[in-house]
């Protein structure tokens, strides 16, 4: 059952990441579709791995007929994401301009007073809604665009949308416009607009047959826009590396030493003689990798890229975790 424990542990870590993304910048992203999306993506990936539907159904603990019905139903509606109570309440307040607490509770009575009250409190704390008065006499007003800036647009702001489309084309290309639209969860008109912008800027190339490709993908360090694309690229690099390691037996012997990852932890503190050296590793890696990439690109531009080639994806990450005096804490617990 070691694999099951590993799967459970990874799911918990991914859940933490999703929760952080869903609440970043004060925004509450809708999550109603996540469970269905995970099920459908898992089902599709199992099929790609050559697992029969009968075996996949058994892995999910479902009867084959029920499994097939669920896959078909979700496949037909995967582009329609669910609206949350949080979104619905905010949109209702925007439409009313001024909405009393009693009016809101009546409108959403089927959702429960406690649930609606919690949403109202969160909207107020987030600054998306202003509240005047207390109790059932409280009145709510949605913040204006001028008051909220980019945050007030709530899911309509397309900042970072071009970068996300760019990295998807770079990593998944050659790709069709329809496939890109599916990845982005957008309609064809919205996707076509993004493709036009990316093509005009030279970031994405469109072939005569309509296939999309990108020669490179770079988000400048410290850029305020495009962090979503960077997060996706980081996660995909880690996942691809782990997947290749799991398939190590299928790799050529010459690839055994060039595919994989290593994690190192260093226990340091302010004033430690090696503190600066340890903390500078990420910056050092960035400098070395950027210089190497420039030399590789210069060679490729001068000599051209072969029809078949390997793309080496190298990822480095670094974080700081605050740790307490474990031995002292243990002694204190023992003495209590």
Image (cartoon, grey):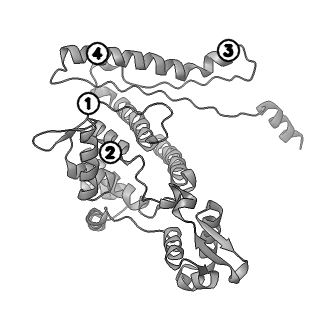
Taking depth in this image into account, of 283 and 274 the one nearest to the observer is 283
Point out the residue furthest to the front here: 146
Quadrant in which the C terminus is drawn: top right
Q: CA distance from mark 1 to mark 4?
A: 13 Å
The residue carrying mark 3 is: 274
Say if residue 254 shows up in the picture.
Answer: no
Give the Cα distance between marks 1 and 3. Answer: 39 Å
Residue on which the image places disc 1: 215
Q: Crowdedness of circle 1 by 10 Å Cα count: few (<14), some, many (20+)?
A: few
As drawn, which residue projects farthest toward the left? 208
Q: CA distance from mark 2 to mark 3?
A: 41 Å
Q: Is there CB contact under 8 Å for labels 3 and 4?
A: no
Residue tagged by mark 2? Answer: 165
Q: Secondary structure at mark 4?
A: helix
Q: Which mark is residue 298?
A: 4
Question: Which badge, 2 or 1, comes first in the chain's sequence?
Answer: 2
Q: Quarter-wise, where is residue 205 in the image?
A: top left
- Up-down: is 212 above or below 149? above
Is label 2 in a helix, a strand or a loop?
helix
Q: Is residue 88 left or right of residue 214?
A: right
For disc 2, the neighbor class at 10 Å (few under 14, some 14 to 19, many from 20) is many
Q: Nearer the viewer, mark 2 or mark 3?
A: 2
Tag 3 or tag 2, which sits nearer the N-term? 2
The label shown at residue 112 is none
Q: Earlier in the sequence, mark 1 or mark 3?
A: 1
Label 2 – label 4 distance at C-alpha: 26 Å
Which comes sooner in the sequence, label 1 or label 4? 1
Dot 4, crowdedness within 10 Å: few (<14), some or many (≥20)?
Answer: few
Percent x, y of residue 45: 30, 48
Residue at the location (28% across, 42% down)? Answer: 198
């Amino acid at each position: 059952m070691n694999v099951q424990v590993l799967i459970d542990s990874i799911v918990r870590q991914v859940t933490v990441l999703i929760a952080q993304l869903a609440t970043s910048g004060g925004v509450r992203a809708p999550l109603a579709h996540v469970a269905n999306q995970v099920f459908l993506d898992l089902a599709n990936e199992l099929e790609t791995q050559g697992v029969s539907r009968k075996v996949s159904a058994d892995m999910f603990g479902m009867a084959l007929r029920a499994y097939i019905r669920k896959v078909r139903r979700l496949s037909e509606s995967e582009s329609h994401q669910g609206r949350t109570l949080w979104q619905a309440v905010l949109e209702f307040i925007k439409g009313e301009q001024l909405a009393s607490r009693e009016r809101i509770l009546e409108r959403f009575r089927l959702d429960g007073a406690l649930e609606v009250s919690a949403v109202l409190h969160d909207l107020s704390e987030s600054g998306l809604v202003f509240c005047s008065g207390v109790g059932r006499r409280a009145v709510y007003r949605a913040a204006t665009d001028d008051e909220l800036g980019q945050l007030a647009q709530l899911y309509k702001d397309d900042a970072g949308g071009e970068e996300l489309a760019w990295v998807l084309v770079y990593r998944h290309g050659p790709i069709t416009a329809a496939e890109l639209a599916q990845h982005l969860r957008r309609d064809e008109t919205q996707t076509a607009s993004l493709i036009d912008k990316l093509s005009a800027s030279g970031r994405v190339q469109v072939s005569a047959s309509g296939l999309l490709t990108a020669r490179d993908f770079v988000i400048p360090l410290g850029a305020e826009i495009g962090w979503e694309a960077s997060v996706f690229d980081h996660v995909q690099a880690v996942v691809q590396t782990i997947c290749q390691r799991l398939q190590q037996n299928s790799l050529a012997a010459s690839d055994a030493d060039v595919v994989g990852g290593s994690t190192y932890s260093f226990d340091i503190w302010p004033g430690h003689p090696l503190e600066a050296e340890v903390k500078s590793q990420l910056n050092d890696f960035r400098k070395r990798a950027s210089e190497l990439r420039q030399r590789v690109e210069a060679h490729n531009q001068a000599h051209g890229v072969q029809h078949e080639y390997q793309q080496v994806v190298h990822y480095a990450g670094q974080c700081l975790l605050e740790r307490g005096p474990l031995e002292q804490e243990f002694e204190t617990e023992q003495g209590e």
